[in-house]
Amino acid sequence: MDKIFVAIFTPEFLFSVIRVSTPLILGAMAALICNRGGMLHIAFEGIMLSAAFLGMLTSALTQNVLIGVLGAIAGGLLISMMLGYFHLVLNSDRTLTGIALNTFASAGTVFALYLLVQDKGTSSSLPSLVVPNLDIPILKDIPVLGTALSGHNALTYVAFLTVFLTYIIVFRTPLGLRIRTVGENPNAAASVGIDVMKVRFITLAISAVVASLAGAYMSMGYLSWFSRDMVAGRGFMAIAAQNLGAALPLPSFLAALAFGAVTALANVLQTLNMPSEIIQAMPYVATLVGLGFFGYAAKKGNEKRAKASLAHAKEREAV
């Protein structure tokens, strides 16, 4: 136990928490945007995985990091627009479509990897690039904080910036007002001339760009290559984080950090000879516990609102 406390209360552990939380933060912001637009789906695994694969591939072919990131965004947008077409145009079930697209991305990336390098595991034989790390001036020289907060991958700092940008876009712009209006009441939005389908496609596109950055980070930051199913449930954890955060940027960000902390703790415990099955299950158990807490809190909130409504109705009858 002493070894655990010694390992946790260090700048290196905080650095690890931020590092592993990066795709969760980006995924949570993407899920938040979809939730606010009434288009929350479960295809984030497929979006992030496709982005990770195409980011790796385009960076390897062009030897350009920026083009690699743009390739990752294109891969995520492809899956998101497929979801939009099947659900919004062809009226398919959103959940079933998400499951199908996740499966398609999982199998499709492995098949494409095999065609390219005759390997079904990793792309280590491809000369792909990584997004560089950044040392923040002044901050890097501060004791403790400099070690924890400086020297991260550039996409990590983009993830932090995305929290602020998500708030601005969703809550402080005319487009954000349209997205929230369509998400809350599409019929009312249509009655005032808002093109509901167009706004929903825009919502999916913005969300896909953010989620694609999470995928790009996985193969061009967290690792320097692509491996099969490397997203490993982070898309679902991101959805859980924005649910815990009640579709608000700051609480969702904190929930993503909490899930990241559990994952970082699991990495620390690997050095203490604990059973690997327990360690691997920890992030997912934390997700289930968080969702259970969210469900309980939501139930209590609904009961409280129902009692308040009933009391108000009785007061009106008495008058």
Image (tube, rainbow, N blue to C red):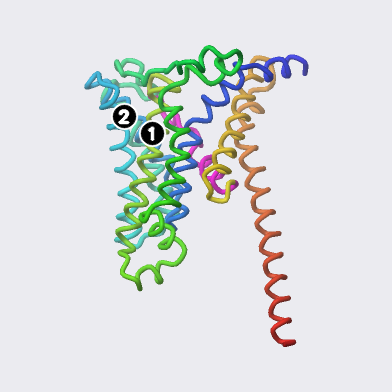
**Left of 297 or right of it: where is 169?**
left
- The correct choice, above or below, for 290 with respect to 297 in the image is above
Q: Residue at x 45, y 28 (%)?
A: 157
Q: Camera-side residue: 43 or 205?
A: 205
Magenta run includes residue 236: yes
Mark 2 is on which residue type?
Val
Residue 129: percent from left, percent from top: 32, 18
Mark 2 and mark 1 in contact? Answer it, CB < 8 Å. yes
**Left of 8 or right of it: where is 158?**
left
Disc 1 packing (10 Å; few <14; some 14–19; many ≥20)? many
Residue 278: percent from left, percent from top: 66, 28
The numbered dot on residue 32 is: none
Q: Mark 2 highlights which residue?
A: 69
* SS state under label 1: helix
Magenta run includes residue 162: no
Q: What span is in magenta?
A: 226-244
Asked where in the image residue 72 lies, by quadrant, the reply is: top left
- The correct choice, above or below, for 66 with respect to 86 in the image is above
Give the Cα separation between the discs numbered 2 and 1: 7 Å
**Image quarter in which the N terminus is found:** top right
Mark 1 is on which residue type?
Leu
* SS state under label 2: helix
Residue 174: percent from left, percent from top: 36, 56
- The correct choice, above or below, for 35 with respect to 319 in the image is above
Which residue, as the protein is rendered here, is positioned at the far left? 62
The numbered dot on residue 213 is: 1
Disc 2 packing (10 Å; few <14; some 14–19; many ≥20)? many
